[in-house]
Amino acid sequence: NILDLISTSLDKAFDQTFSRHIFQPKKIYIAAEKKMLQIAILSLLRIESKRPSFSVERLEFRSSYKYKGFSINLQIDRIDKLGVNEYLLIDYKLGFLSKKGWTDDYLTDPQLPLYLLVFNDNYQNSYANSLSYCFVRLNEKQGFSGLKNISSATENIDGIKNYDEKLWSDQISEWKISLDNSIEQILNGKIHINLKKIISIDQDLKSRFNKY
């Protein structure tokens, strides 16, 4: 039974998470959160079932991005194989995020582009031709939101748009240059802090906790 599998997995995940913390939420809050996640996951699985053929290649793939002795450790939530040597990198999110930060002038959201660079370095002769957030939510924004190399031969996935602003290889090169420049600034003691983003995150956290 799929509901039993989801419930068992949630119990295990919650136990592992809270076993590492002194603070323990009230049982009624944990039960409510589990119920909401169970509904959201079941809805997400319905979306997944409508996708073109794929296989889950890796879960929680750990690696690091290195530049001039500076290392960024990371963990890719999920890697799906879509076709011959073509892959989709997925990052799960509970809150909503826009993918616009992947292609703006300053690469204000480097997470998924960073994943792609690391993946391409680790998987020889294989390429990540698609990047996507996967929203686990209880509203209409449930599902995928990402970009795909328009030259890819794999079938389209709802929510993942064909990227046609420039060649995919050129975009990857720009991501690498932008990330390396950012690390260079950190190494040189020049760090830019986006106060608007911090305030936005703080307000989002407050709204989540206020419901309790």
Image (spheres, rainbow, N blue to C red):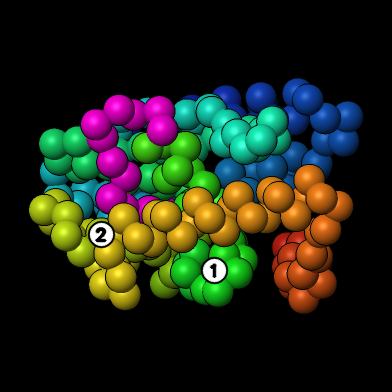
Q: Is residue 74 left or right of residue 134?
A: right
Write down the region rendered in magenta.
Answer: 121-134
Q: Which residue is mark 2?
A: 149
Q: Position of residue 135 (x, y in %)?
A: 47, 58
Residue at image location 54% in from the left, 68% down from the top: 101
Mark 2: which secondary structure?
strand
Q: Nearer the viewer, residue 13 or 156?
A: 156
User: Which mark, by number, is residue 101?
Assistant: 1
Near mark 2 (Cα within 10 A), the count class, few <14, some 14-19 or many ≥20, is many
Residue at image location 26% in from the left, 35% down from the top: 126
Residue 130 lies in the magenta-colored region:
yes
Quadrant in which residue 15 is drawn: top right
Q: Position of residue 105 (x, y in %)?
A: 55, 74
Residue 56 lies in the magenta-colored region:
no
Residue at image location 28% in from the left, 41% down from the top: 127
Rendered-image quadrant of the C terminus = bottom right
Rendered-image quadrant of the N terminus = top left
Q: Nearer the viewer, residue 74 or 67?
A: 67
The type of residue carrying mark 1 is Gly
Q: Nearer the viewer, residue 49 or 74?
A: 74
Q: Is residue 169 above or below residue 192?
A: above
